[in-house]
Image (cartoon, grey):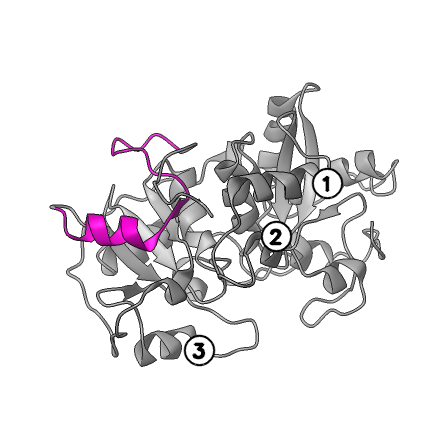
């Protein structure tokens, strides 16, 4: 199991170095300190159930709720993804209202192995702020749950732009897919859409020494194109590899797999220190868990494609691959 120490690869925070995962013992130890972390419940469900209702029915005592749809994502864009990155001001105001200020230490959880809470954690870490997943999520808490809503005093928080070097856009993904699949997706030029301008800069930044790997975090049956419950087309981006985010979690304990097991998952897909992961999923939410896992095992910082499959599948002129890839 992860050691929960908070040690390892992490963005510089000005605080003690905090890795992407912490365990219950770490949280309990630091909750009693002078500057306890803000515990955040980030439950959300693809089937339409209310994450807020689940939070109010029972949550870790003292935890605040942060809504994916209104704080961690912008409204869906025509031709774009279902969960675009929020405007930096919208993000800052939403966290400030929840009592999360500049430099607040955040520990986030959900009840789906951290795959939803990873969005908040990755966004904060991409900004260089201290944030981690609670390993084991809601199930890691052994005491009685608290009902209702926790209201913290609002704090000041400054809007900051999303770092372009941690993001990929549709235009770049088209190029990477074409390279990986022998040109199957390379014919489209000048793709419009969120991130296109940033993508040009990304191609210049990456250079020939780094090989980009498209990593799809959806369930295998969605990757293969056997089912598609949400988006217009079934399948995956040509050349992508599949690492389902559910595989990051041990099904028995509900905790993340140890570093050695996580490293083996990446290695099994040919991803090591020489590769740079461009992660996607259905709408750019659970893909953040792939990037946290890459950080946990010491791989080079990966990048998020916020539009993900929900963006690609809305462009009928882009090719769709099916099968195992």
Cα–Cα span, label 3 and label 2: 23 Å
Is residue 281 something that shows in the picture?
yes
Disc sitting over residue 244 in the figure: none
Q: Residue furthest left?
A: 34
Which residue is label 1 attached to? 269
Q: How dense is the environment of label 1, judged by Cα within 10 Å: few (below 14), some, or many (20 and up)?
A: few
Percent from the top left, x then y, of residue 122? 45, 46
| Number of residues whose C-alpha sits closer than 10 Å to that of mark 3, classed few (under 14), some (14–19) or many (20 or more) | few
The quadrant where residue 67 appears: bottom left
Q: Considering depth in this image, is 252 or 248 the residue closer to the camera?
A: 252
Q: Quadrant of residue 66?
A: bottom left
Q: Which residue is mark 2?
A: 307
Q: Nearer the viewer, mark 2 or mark 1?
A: 1
Q: Position of residue 93 (x, y in %)?
A: 29, 55
Q: Cβ–Cβ below 8 Å for labels 3 and 2? A: no
137 part of magenta stretch: no
Residue interval drawn in magenta: 11-33
In the foreground, 162 or 215: 215
First in residue order: circle 1 vs circle 3: 3
Percent from the top left, x then y, of residue 28? 23, 54
Tell me the residue that label 3 is attached to. 50
Residue 228, percent from left and from top = 73, 69
At 39% from the left and 32% from the top, the residue drawn is: 11
208, above or below 22, in the image: above
Q: Residues within 10 Å of mark 2 (few under 14, many from 20)?
A: many
Query: Of residues 160 and 281, which is closer to you in this image?
Result: 281
Mark 2 secondary-structure assignment: loop
Q: Nearer the viewer, mark 1 or mark 3?
A: 1
């Amino acid at each position: 199991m992860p050691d929960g120490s908070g040690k390892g690869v992490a963005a510089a925070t000005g605080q003690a170095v905090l890795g992407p995962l912490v365990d219950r013992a770490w949280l309990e130890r630091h909750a009693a300190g002078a500057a306890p972390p803000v515990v955040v419940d980030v439950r959300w469900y693809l089937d339409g159930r209310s994450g807020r209702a689940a939070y109010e029915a029972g949550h870790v005592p003292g935890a605040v709720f942060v809504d994916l749809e209104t704080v961690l994502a912008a409204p869906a864009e025509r031709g774009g993804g279902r969960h675009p990155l929020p405007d930096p001001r919208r993000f800052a105001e939403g966290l400030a209202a929840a009592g999360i200020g500049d430099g607040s230490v955040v520990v986030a959880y959900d009840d789906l192995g951290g795959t939803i809470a990873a969005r908040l954690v990755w966004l904060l870490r991409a900004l260089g702020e201290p944030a981690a997943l609670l390993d084991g999520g809601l199930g890691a808490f052994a005491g009685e749950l608290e009902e209702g809503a926790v209201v913290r005093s609002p704090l000041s928080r400054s809007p900051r732009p999303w770092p372009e070097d941690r993001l990929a856009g549709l235009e770049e993904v088209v190029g990477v897919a074409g390279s990986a699949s022998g040109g199957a997706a390379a014919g489209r030029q000048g793709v419009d859409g969120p991130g296109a301008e940033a993508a040009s800069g990304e191609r210049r930044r990456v250079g020939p020494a780094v090989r980009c790997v498209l990593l799809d975090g959806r369930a295998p049956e969605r990757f293969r194109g056997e089912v598609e419950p949400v988006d217009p087309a079934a399948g995956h981006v040509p050349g992508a590899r599949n690492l389902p985010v559910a595989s990051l979690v041990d099904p028995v304990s509900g905790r993340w797999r140890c570093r050695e097991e996580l490293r083996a998952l990446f290695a099994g897909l040919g991803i090591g220190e020489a590769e740079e992961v461009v992660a996607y999923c259905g709408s750019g939410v659970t893909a953040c868990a792939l990037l946290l896992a890459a950080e946990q095992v010491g791989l080079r910082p990966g990048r998020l494609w916020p539009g993900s499959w929900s963006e690609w599948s809305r462009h009928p002129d882009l090719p769709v691959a099916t099968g195992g890839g």
